[in-house]
Image (tube, rainbow, N blue to C red):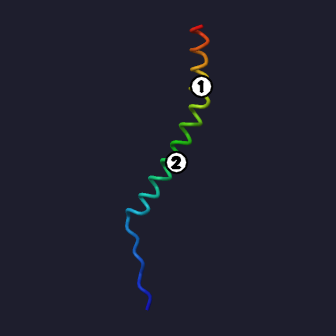
Amino acid sequence: MAEDAVTSVALPLGVGMALSAIVLTGLYVWRANGEFDRLTRSIVEDAK
């Protein structure tokens, strides 16, 4: 007779945290490469 496998709650929570960290990092990089670079370029041009 096969025994039931038990997965603790910590494993899915840990995987979820890791995936959310990857997604949030990707969103930040996407925004930083667009909006923040434009703002920085504008500030540098205005300072010249």
Q: Identify the residue shown where x is 41% and y is 58%.
A: 13
Q: Quadrant of the C terminus?
A: top right
Of helix, strand and loop, which one carries label 1? helix
Q: Is the Cβ of the residue at disc 2 closer than 8 Å to that at disc 1? A: no
Residue 41's quadrant in the figure?
Answer: top right
Bin the neighbour count of mark 2 within 10 Å (Cα to Cα): few under 14, some 14-19, many 20 and up. few
Q: Quadrant of the N terminus?
A: bottom left
Q: Identify the residue shown where x is 37% and y is 68%.
A: 8
The dot on residue 37 is 1
Residue 19 position (above or below residue 9): above
The dot on residue 20 is none
Residue 36 place in picture, x, y as percent: 56, 26
Of the image marks 2 and 1, the number of the one nearer the N terminus:
2
Q: Identify the residue shown where x is 39% and y is 75%.
A: 6
Inter-mark Cα distance, 2 to 1: 21 Å
- Return the residue at label 2: 22
Bin the neighbour count of mark 1 within 10 Å (Cα to Cα): few under 14, some 14-19, many 20 and up. few
Q: Identify the residue shown where x is 55% and y is 40%.
A: 27
Residue type, mark 2 in image: Ile
Of helix, strand and loop, which one carries label 2? helix
Residue 34 place in picture, x, y as percent: 62, 29
